[in-house]
Image: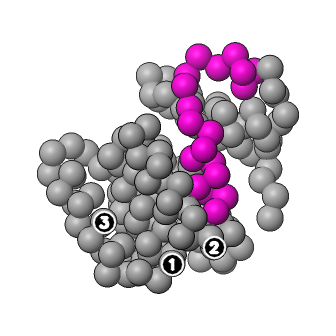
Amino acid sequence: RSMNCDSMGTVLNTLKKLDPIRKYGGLEALYKICIGDEIGLRNMKTPFDFRLFEVERLIILREYKQALEKLKLNKSSLSDNYYLLLKGEILGLSGQKAEAMKVIGEIEQLSRQRHIWPSLFAHLYMAAGEEEKAYQYLEKAKKEHDLDLHLLPYFATFYLKNDDPRFQAFMKGTWVN
């Protein structure tokens, strides 16, 4: 399924209006790649490691071992949340449910120190095959107006769900739509 550059641009602009302080370097870079804006991409002031797009691509292609190797190589350039999100996604989608649940435990520990958006938990539970638990967190995310709901369709776990009627209905029922 090809990405829709127009919808991605709309998402990016909406996010910038809702939370202008937050940096959206990754999504902005992905949008520039999508529309073919090579000059804008080279001139970006926000540093972003494009190798992480390769990790997501490998996950979508179900090349989990290679994705985990690339992720480990790039760990130092990631926040704890993003590293654990990608690690849990890879482990869950590759069928390593026990390991994916350990990652969820690590995120739960982090949530005692700082706020973790419910969409991150939804993401990890969905990847681990715990759909009901994932949808519970998605509902929490909707109630909290979790900004990361905008990004879900662009991550491998939910990208693979874009044709799922339940996921489509959820996204249509959110404030994101």
* Magenta residues (range): 40-58
Mark 1–mark 2 contact, CB under 8 Å? yes
> Residue 82, percent across and down?
41, 48
Q: Name the N-terminal-most of marks 2 and 3.
A: 2
Tag 1 secondary structure: loop
Instruction: Provide the residue designation for mark 3.
Output: 103
SS at mark 2 in the image: loop
> How far is disc 2 from disc 3 in space, using C-alphas?
19 Å
- For label 3, the crowd category at 10 Å Cα-Cα, with few meaning under 14, some 14 to 19 and many 20 or more, is many
**What's the residue type where badge 3 is placed?**
Val
| Rendered residue at 58%/55% (across/down) | 55
Q: Is residue 141 visible?
A: no
Q: Which mark is residue 62?
A: 2
State the residue at coordinates (31%, 81%): 98
Tag 2: residue type? Arg
Of all residues shown, which one is farthest toward the right? 36
Mark 2 surroundings: few (<14), some (14-19) or many (≥20) residues within 10 A: some
Name the residue beneath numbered marker 1.
Answer: 94
The answer to whether mark 1 and mark 3 are in CB contact below 8 A is: no
